[in-house]
Amino acid sequence: GLSGTYLGVDIDDRFDREADFPDLSSRFEMGDAHTVDLGAPDLVFSFSALEHIPNDTALLARLRGALKPGGMQVHVVPGGWALLAYLWHGYRHYHRTALKARFPMEQTRIIAVGGPGSLMLHTLVIAVPEILLHINLRKRWPDLFGRLTVFALAVDRLLPIMPTSYVVIERAGNST
């Protein structure tokens, strides 16, 4: 059901050319998001990318200026607790105050994601074994990992603290 035009931008070419959506034209630009021709997008989406941009404030201003009226930006970024879950991955980790400063639009939503259950699961079953020990416990015991994931998410719902990520949604044209 996807339709429109998709532009992927990255400093490395990891673009998936196998995806087939008949109503979606797509292209990839390898380069710096600060300088690539973005056109006038309806939607800007990034997942675990913004934390790698040294001058994220300048990039966000550029993206905000490129959006069509009524368009939106959606970014998923690591929270402070992600340092445990992802170790040294990324240039920075965000907290709510830093995100509010970077996303000053009136109707911006900042949604905390994760919590102590998913933090412990990711740290003990993914980060330490896979990153440090090169052992993939998820592949070795997928059923156990699935049950642990369900349990971790239940813990996160009971204890809505210690977010590992934030989802930021900002609509264009609603400045404060």
Image (spheres, rainbow, N blue to C red):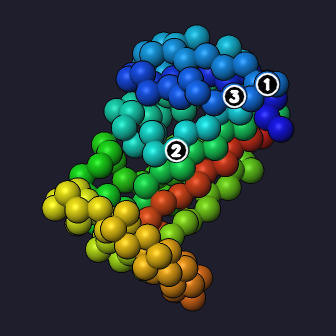
Three-letter amino acid code at disc 1? Pro
All told, the count of numbered labels is 3
Q: Position of residue 145 (x, y in %)?
A: 43, 74
Q: Position of residue 74 (x, y in %)?
A: 64, 43
From the image, tell me which residue sits under label 1.
22
Q: Secondary structure at mark 3?
A: loop
Q: Quadrant of the C terminus?
A: top right
Q: Are marks 2 and 3 in contact (CB under 8 Å)?
A: no
From the image, tell me which residue sits under label 3.
20
Real-space CA distance between mark 1 and mark 3, rounded to the nearest whole angstrom: 6 Å
Residue 34 visible in the snapshot: no
Of residue 122 and residue 77, the one placed in the foreground of this image is: 122
Residue 47: assigned label: 2
Residue 6: assigned label: none
Residue 15's place in the image compared with 123, above or below, is above
x 37%, y 53%: residue: 93
Q: Are marks 1 and 3 in contact (CB under 8 Å)?
A: yes
